[in-house]
Amino acid sequence: MKIAAPASTHKRVVVLLLDRTAVSGYLNPSLLGHGEGADLLTCDGEHRAIPLGEIKAIYFVREFTEPFEPERKIFLSRPKLDGLWVRLRFRDEELLEGIVPNNLLDLLDTGVQLIPPDLHGNVLRIFIPRVALAEMKVLGVMGVARRSPQPSHSKDAISKAQTKLFGE
């Protein structure tokens, strides 16, 4: 009987530091925001702990060989994805738009994970530590959940609930 190896939880990332240097490696995304930094396994096989205060953004990429920064930093038109359309302003005044989940509990963590405007580029999503941001504005709510239909009442139930205006 063949035993399958467990799936890797480490994803390809490029960590952009505040001094604009980039470090490529592998990272477990489930550990982001739960500690004081990011534990990175570099492409050379070395372990590197990077404090969140030194990170500008963590780019989850398809391939290391392609450019890691998105070609487009803002949406050209209203996005079609569900979530909150946000504009982030970094401390160095750089702007970036993206879609974050419409769950306010996720926004109260130590950082924000968003989907960039360039959906077909090398970047799948971006994690930005809160300390790297100067401002975050919600530009719109995309894919608003529809209200659930009210239960329909039968004609008899409605007529019994209404006050009789005329004696019958």
Image (cartoon, rainbow, N blue to C red):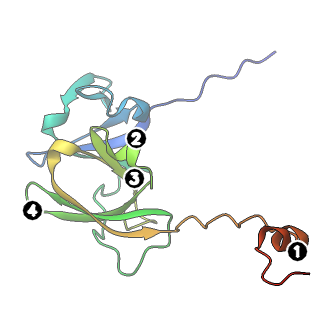
- N-terminal of the two: label 1 or label 2? 2
Q: Secondary structure at mark 3?
A: strand
Q: Residue at x 81, y 71 (%)?
A: 158
> What is the distance, in whole Å, between disc 1 and disc 2 at their CAs?
60 Å
Q: Nearer the viewer, residue 23 or 154?
A: 154
> What is the distance, in whole Å, between disc 4 and disc 1 at their CAs?
61 Å
> What is the distance, in whole Å, between disc 4 and disc 3 at their CAs?
21 Å
Q: Amino acid at mark 2?
A: Arg
Q: Residue at x 30, y 68 (%)?
A: 71
The quadrant in which residue 26 appears is top left
Instruction: Give the residue number, with chain letter if any, for mark 4.
Output: 93
The residue mark sitting in front, 4 or 3, is 4
Q: Is residue 122 left or right of residue 16?
A: right
Instruction: Give the residue number, with chain letter if any, for mark 1.
Output: 155
The residue mark sitting in front, 1 or 2, is 1
Instruction: Give the residue number, with chain letter if any, for mark 2.
Output: 12
Q: Amino acid at mark 1?
A: Lys
